[in-house]
Amino acid sequence: MNAGLKVFAPASVGNVGVGFDCLGFALEKPGDEIIARFSNNKGLKITKITGKKGKKIPFEIEKNTAGFAAYKLLEHLGETERGIEIEIHKKMPLGSGLGSSAASAVAGVMAINELFKRPLEKKELLPFALMGEELASGSRHADNVAPSLLGGLRLIRDNDTLDVHRIPTPNGIFASVIYPHVEILTKDARGILSPTVPLRKMVQQSANLSAFILGMFNSDIELVRRSLKDIVIEPQRAALIPHFYQIKEAALENGALGCSISGSGPSIFALSQNSLIAENVGEAMKKIYTDAKIEFQLFLSPINHEGSIKL
């Protein structure tokens, strides 16, 4: 059998507190892997899915995030009749708020692009990956897809036109991300959000987002610390996550620059100015869930500036 090729797409933190649906950064781990190979059979087929841990991930191309994104790219390339097999290896938790569906979609398009010797530049793959993510989440937002594909901290100025920009980050910035083993569906987490925002909060949130970006550009750690405060989305979703405010308080007490909900949750992220502080923050987070007897996973990672890669 043709061994094929393997690609990796990383997890990501969407929203980053102050940037609902318009800000996200990539982690070094966890992530998803896809193996792709040409076959003698006609069309795109998913032959194996591993790591789903009881979750029902469909094998049908039109229902599978990675498969659908890959097929849309094949349509664009005029290669839908080519025989291709893909294996999906989920190496990250589903429904975690870490962009699991986005990572699968990104890995799907990366695998096809690599298989055909890179007919498109990486950034040109973004619309096709977003189609797969949209299938899973029911909404069009690239705050997970863009960083997973392209790496770094990304601002999505407009989701419809995919006007995406990289934001430079100070050296040493490190993330502590804790995932309590509770399920929060993205569609449900979006459904509880109010469609209106009071003017005062809109002004403050806009100022926080602007100052956060400015702080990152200028490596102004204290400005980042003052700005990483979500006063719109976090208060509406915090009740969905066990011990959220205890986790946040512990992170800030141990030196984190800020702490908020990763994507739709239940994962919680904290940013720190170096890996040592991030480790201490992670230990403080762990203690709360250990004492509460809630199963969890902790991920410590710098911001991943490369995004998806061929392995």
Image (tube, grey):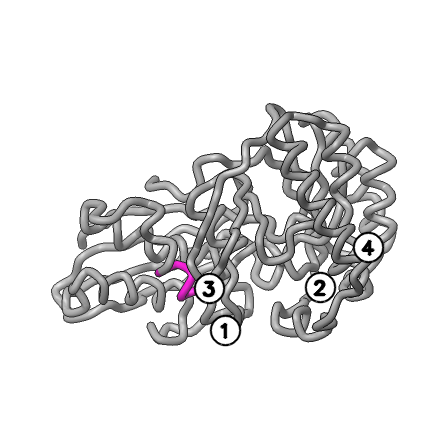
Residue in view at x 23 percent, y 63 percent: 76
Residue 85 position within the rendered picture, expressed as x and y whole percent measured from the top left: 25, 62
Residue 20 position within the rendered picture, expressed as x and y whole percent measured from the top left: 64, 56
Residue 131 sits inside the magenta stretch: yes
Q: Which mark is residue 133?
A: 3
State the predominant SS element of the stretch in magenta: helix
Kind of residue indicated by mark 2: Val
Disc 2: which residue: 182
Q: Earlier in the sequence, mark 4 or mark 1?
A: 1
Disc 1: which residue: 56
Disc 4: which residue: 244
Residue in view at x 66 percent, y 61 percent: 264
Q: Earlier in the sequence, mark 3 or mark 1?
A: 1
Choose mark 3 or mark 1, whichever is in front: 3
Task: Give the magenta part as a residue range.
Answer: 128-133
Q: Are marks 4 and 2 in contact (CB under 8 Å)?
A: no
- For this rendering, which residue is in front, 257 or 251? 257
Kind of residue indicated by mark 1: Lys
Residue 253 position within the rendered picture, expressed as x and y whole percent measured from the top left: 87, 36
Q: Judge from the rendering whether residue 77 lies leftward or rightward of residue 271; answer left or right.
A: left
Choose mark 4 or mark 2, whichever is in front: 4
